[in-house]
Image (tube, grey):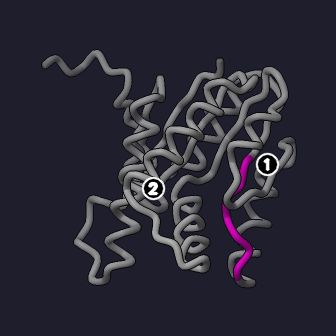
Amino acid sequence: MAGLTLITGGCRSGKSRFALEKANSVSGKKIFLATCPRIDPEMDERIQRHQKERTAWHTIEEELQLSPVFDSMMPESIVLLDCLSLWINNLMFDSNNKNQNLTQESVKDTCSELGKHILNSQAKNVILVTNEVGMGIVPENKQGRMYRDLLGICNQTFASIASEVYFLVSGIPIRIKPSSDISL
């Protein structure tokens, strides 16, 4: 059973850097699962820059179908999935192209199913990176509000099954699960 860590925070908060450091501190074959679509030259440049940071890593690019990747995971591997935010975006885009609607319930089910595949995989550790987008203003359009809500459901689902959750603020990781600092 894989150990699961969720790392969340705002854009450019240091999530990916922290996730790489955390993954590199554990022995095992390093696998980077990238969900970012190649959509324009600027994004291609970002992808290339990030790949240079991970020369010792095996990269798998998959925008939508993540469960099969975990079903075929090598034993004792360390997997860094970056990121859930783009995955939810990709699912929304794909469903819109198929004239289907994602709902909070369908996203929760999809995330729960992926969580089962992750936890039952042969990976030693899995680190998930996501964005916290619900701390700002309410988006002005329906698509933006839907994205915020669906990603919030996704993040809650993975936080509930993760053994560790970190929130990054200005490059500083704050461990929020497990935490012995809070007593209710």
- Could you tell me the amino acid type at mark 2? Asn
Q: Is residue 133 left or right of residue 183?
A: right
Task: Give how far across and how far down residue 35 sits, in percent.
Answer: 67, 58
Task: Give how far across and how far down residue 65 sits, in percent.
Answer: 70, 53
Instruction: Of the two numbered discs 1 and 2 on the same chain, state the one appearing first in sequence.
Output: 1
Question: Could you tell me which residue is drawn at 73 percent across and 37 percent down?
Answer: 70
Tell me which secondary structure the magenta stretch mostly adopts. loop
The one nearer the camera, 9 or 147, is: 147
The residue carrying mark 1 is 54
Q: In this view, does 90 lie to the left or right of 143?
A: right
Mark 2: few/some/many CA within 10 Å (<14, 14-19, 20+): many
Q: What element carries label 1?
A: loop
Task: Give, as a single range, the part of the protein colored magenta.
Answer: 33-39
Q: In the rendered image, which quarter is residue 180 located in?
A: top left
Q: Tell me the number on the disc at residue 76.
A: none
The one nearer the camera, 88 or 48, is: 88
Mark 1: few/some/many CA within 10 Å (<14, 14-19, 20+): some
Q: Which quarter of the image is occupied by the N terminus?
A: top right
- Could you tell me the amino acid type at mark 1? Arg
Q: Is mark 2 on a helix, strand or loop?
A: loop
Question: Could you tell me which residue is drawn at 37 percent across and 50 percent down?
Answer: 153
Task: Give how far across and how far down residue 82 sits, in percent.
Answer: 63, 51
Query: Which circle, 1 or 2, is nearer the viewer?
Result: 2
Asked if the magenta segment contains residue 136, the reply would be no
Asked if the magenta segment contains residue 36, the reply would be yes
The residue carrying mark 2 is 131
Q: In the rendered image, which quarter is residue 174 located in?
A: top left
The one nearer the camera, 67 or 8, is: 67
Furthest residue toward left: 184
Q: Is residue 103 left or right of residue 76?
A: left
